[in-house]
Image: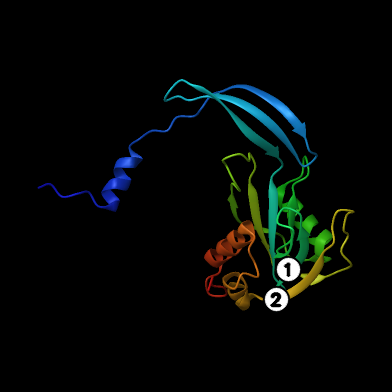
Amino acid sequence: MQARPGPTATANARALVTIKPWPHRDREVIADMDIFRIHRVLSRSPRTGADRHFTLLETSDWINVVALTPEDDVVLVEQFRHGTGEVTLEIPGGLVDPGEEPDAAARRELREETGYEGDPPILLGTVTPNPAFLNNRCHTFLIQNCRAVGEPELDHGEDIAVSLHPLAGVGRLIAGGSIQHALVICAFWWLAQRMPERFRME
């Protein structure tokens, strides 16, 4: 009797299947919602040749900032999130403005949301937040030696409380559910890869 392939063999076999792009045959803007535009896209399956409609959200790239003070505290923000209807604990972040470089957006968002500034931003990593229907990327930056240089400069749609938390305790905040934002957790994963001697995801 022939042995069944193990997980590695199965994974290798699956990797031999070539997935082809679905050509976009038509695209219509359904709504312009300021921070994103909703597209109805008609695409054709390269496997079956059948057409199907998909929803695509077009938006700017995002940035997240892991801001560390000289004492190894993390600058965190609390704010109400309308999607879940909850107050969340997060790192500073926001949209990259048109024509703006992501590292400049990181410095700007940190200053506007928290009143802190620090060393030049270091890119930790970039992810696609949800490639199923979002077209953008999220860039996570590390800014060290952060100090308060003034008051936050919040826009009319923001109410933010700034707090400092020991870097060593962030893993417990995540494990205990105090931090649930997926992109924030991803940011600390990037940080753990960059400086494993100073931070671990507990």
Q: CA distance from mark 2 to mark 1?
A: 7 Å
For marks 2 and 1 on the same chain, the one whose residue lies earlier in the sequence:
1
Q: Quadrant of residue 24?
A: top right
The circle drawn on residue 128 is none
Rendered position, 91 above or below 198: above
Q: Tell me where residue 59 appears, x and y as whole percent.
A: 71, 40
Q: Tell me where residue 77 appears, x and y as whole percent.
A: 76, 66
Q: Tell me where residue 162 appears, x and y as whole percent.
A: 79, 69
Q: Are the residues at dot 2 and dot 1 in contact (C-beta closer than 8 Å)?
A: yes
Query: What residue type is disc 2 on?
Result: His
Q: On the picture, is 145 further left or further right than 152?
A: left
Label 2, on which residue?
A: 165
Mark 1, residues whose alpha carbon is within 10 Å: few (<14), some, or many (≥20)?
A: many
Mark 2, residues whose alpha carbon is within 10 Å: few (<14), some, or many (≥20)?
A: some
The circle drawn on residue 76 is 1
Q: Residue furthest left?
A: 1
Query: What residue type is disc 1 on?
Result: Leu
Of 129 and 67, the residue lying toward us: 129
Q: On the picture, is 32 further left or further right than 46?
A: right
Give the residue drawn at x 38%, y 33%: 18
